[in-house]
Amino acid sequence: MKPTQKPHNPNYSSGPCSKRPGYDVASLKLDTLGRSHRSAIGKATLKSACDETAELLGLPDGYRVGVVPASDTGAMEMAMWSLLGARPVDVFYWESFGKGWRSDIEQQLKLDNARFFEAAYGQLPDLSQADPAHDVVFTWNGTTSGVRVPNGDWIADDREGLTICDATSAVFAQSMPWEKLDVVTYSWQKVLGGEAAHGMLILSPRAVERLESYTPPWPMPKIFRLTKGGELIEGIFQGATINTPSMLCVADYLDALGWVRQQGGVGATIARCNANLAVIEQFVAENEWIDFLAGSADIRSNTSVCLSVDLPPEGVKAMVSLLADEGVAYDIGAYRDAPPGLRIWCGATVEAADLETLMPWLAWAYNEVKE
């Protein structure tokens, strides 16, 4: 039978993601609007965004946090263009965004000392192949595949190379071994449900040392420059951004960080994501026609949950459209490069109660299309 109860919030997009529960744009602190981002109040607000991020994430001493342009993509490009080339690099990828980093390294930077390790959607490559003497580029959580690395045990504590990690759908949702990560990038629009277009760049002291001791052989666009005269531009990590940010988006980000603090910190947001995944795990266990794209539970994402359905591709599309037409689930189709299926965002801003309400609708839509 067709369910009668609908989710309170039907937004399950994997980016931009659902706003936090109780979000009200009218509650944002907007005293920076109309002011220069380089004014005292502008720089203080941006510095607060960096400082609060470091505190909430529990970053080790010496790690720097900066706000950079162009979302997670901009932060990753900045890191790769600024740091790669000093050592051989190992690239691990298993979905579209990781494949994009390979393309940039191979076709744009044209590094000839690169090794590439690929796995199909739903799987992980052999991470044990990482050479401690090499730099490593990888995603922590494959947003378009629903596959994440289970831990950082494969990263050597005594590594000589740098680890450069795209963690946009993992930060604030999964436990990160910061001491093993030299560069981490993410965007506000994922787990925190913030606004798009701004990225976060986290650097370890080892990454800073590389920046100050190595000059890449290629021209460096101004928007990527992290050093001047061979020294780190510290202002980037003290609120003096490379280009003009949206102070409205910054206010929104600070609101999201405040919500994380109210929940009890990053441990609480991780728990929320795990509880959301558990709702879908129970549903999948009770229904043979749906399964996780991830090949095993230990690599299963708790944010970008990707599912395969026992329907042809056109049937999956019909199911997605039907749920959207009913106003119970928006934007849950698989990413365009991924296998046909569903992708349901289960980040911290999604309520488990809404997912519980959604599950009967999935069964209803499947049966409607199948018949």
Image (cartoon, grey):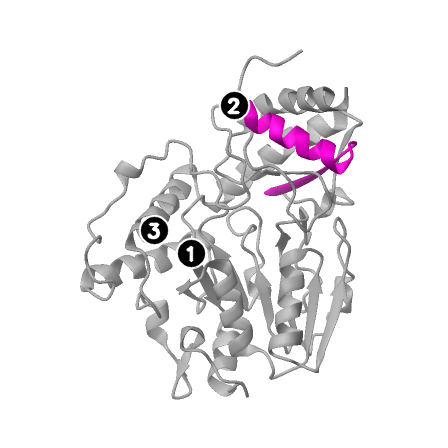
Q: State whether residue 260 is above or below residue 5.
A: below
Name the residue that disc number 3 marks.
Answer: 249
Name the residue that disc number 1 marks.
Answer: 197
Judged from the image, the secondary structure of the residue bearing numbered disc 1 is loop
Number of other residues with Cα within 10 Å of mark 2, as a class: few under 14, some 14 to 19, many 20 or more:
some
* C-alpha distance separating marks 3 and 2: 27 Å
Camera-side residue of 47 and 249: 249
Residue 257 left/right relative to 213: left
For the record, the magenta segment spans 302-326
Number of other residues with Cα within 10 Å of mark 1, as a class: few under 14, some 14 to 19, many 20 or more:
some
Residue 345 left/right relative to 57: right
Residue at position x 61%, y 69% in the image: 163
Give the image quarter of residue 159. Answer: bottom right
Give the image quarter of residue 108. Answer: bottom right
Judged from the image, the secondary structure of the residue bearing numbered disc 2 is loop
Judged from the image, the secondary structure of the residue bearing numbered disc 3 is helix
Magenta stretch: residue 315 in it?
Answer: yes
Residue at position x 60%, y 84% in the image: 86
Q: Is residue 170 visible?
A: yes
Residue 59 left/right relative to 365: left
Residue 168 left/right relative to 159: left
Give the image quarter of residue 343. Answer: top right
Name the residue that disc number 2 marks.
Answer: 7
- Image x and y of residue 12, in percent: 54, 36
Mark 3 or mark 1: name the one nearer the start of the chain. 1
